[in-house]
Each structure stands twice: as structure tokens, then as C-alpha cells.
Image: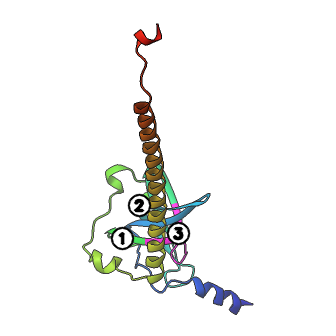
Amino acid sequence: MNSVVLEVANSYKKTKVVDVKSGDTVRVHQKIKEGAKERVQVFEGLVIRVNNKNSQTASILVRRIVGGFGVEKSYLLHSPLVTKVEVTKRGKVRRNYLTYMRDLKGKKARLTGVKFDKQAVNDVPDPEAEKLEAEMKAKQEAEHAEIEAKKAQEEAELKAKQDEVAANHKETPEETPEETK
């Protein structure tokens, strides 16, 4: 039974994920489905915890301050809903779980920055995610083109009606007030 579960889990496992560490400021792109529409939502914040880094269930806990309140979200790195994880800053920390960051506010909540090669860290080729993103973009462009075509057709019909009314108006002679008397 356990081998079947691992086999199914490995089918969803991504070939490569970004090397995320505690103290990093990341931007997580997540697919959200609302009714029939699907969109990508971006959540940017500080990584407080990294769990099971090299396993199938690798996850990160990201914290962000929104409207004076701390918001924490947990993301599974190998989830098909997480399309992209970008590391924007890397902070110098010596712990894996940064619980003390919850109590800090304002300038005290800053971490000392560490220089790193942003391009090398974030460049993780994932052909499936790129293909999916391209398909979503093509679908949105097709919907947009369809809407534009409908608008153009309605405008053409409206223009034709206006021309017809104008032609009918020119054909019928207008009566002057003297002729009606």
C-alpha cells in the first residue's frame, strides 16, 4: 500500500524546485480557481520555516504584514497549484524556524541582507509549468480575441443599420409645412 502512495506522490513531484531557506523573502505564484475562471495570485513575504526540504512533502511557511496584521500561508513546493517561487532577497539567519519574527514590528523586523546570485537561484527550468502558463495565456488571448470579434460584429451590424436608416431617410422626400396645409 505504501509503495502505491509513493508512486502516486512521485507522479506529482516536480523535477526541480527553487532552493528556499529560512529568512528569504519570496514571491509565490499560486493558481486559484474561482468558478470557471482560473488566475494566478502572487503572495510575497518572509519565509519563516522550511519543512522536509528534500522530500515529497517539502513546504514553506511565508509571513507577510497586511493592514497591520500578520498573515501566514503554508505552501507545498511540489504542489501543482504552486506555479513559481521566486527568491527576491536572502536574509542572514541562524535558525530554521523564525518564531521571533512574529513579535517584531517595523524596523526591528528587518533582516541583514546577504548577497546572492538571484538569477542562478531563481532559474529553475520546469517545462510543464511553462507549458501550462503558455496554455493559460493562449486561452486568455483567444477569449479576448473572441470578445473583440463579437464587438466588431455588433459595431458592423449597428453601422449597417445606421446606413440603412440614412438611405431610407434620403429616399423619402420630406414634407414642408406649406404642403401639409
Q: Is residue 40 left or right of residue 90?
A: right
* Residue at the left extreme of this rendering: 115
- Quick check: 32 above or below 150? below
- Mark 2 residue type: Glu
Marks 2/3: CA distance?
12 Å
Query: Which mark sits nearer the N-terminus, 2 or 3?
Result: 2
Q: Position of residue 15 (x, y in %)?
A: 48, 87
Q: Which is nearer the eye, 174 or 113?
A: 174
Rendered location of residue 152, percent (x, y):
43, 52
Q: Local crowd at mark 2 within 10 Å, few (<14), some, or many (≥20)?
A: some
Give the amino acid type for the residue marked by disc 3 in the picture: Tyr
Label pair 1/3, CB-CB below 8 angstroms: no
Provide the residue designation for mark 1: 87
- Image quadrant of residue 108? bottom left
How far separated are the C-alphas under marks 1 and 2? 10 Å
Q: How is the image coloured?
A: rainbow
Name the residue beneath numbered marker 2.
Answer: 44
Percent of width and height locating residue 128: 48, 81
Image quarter of residue 169? top left
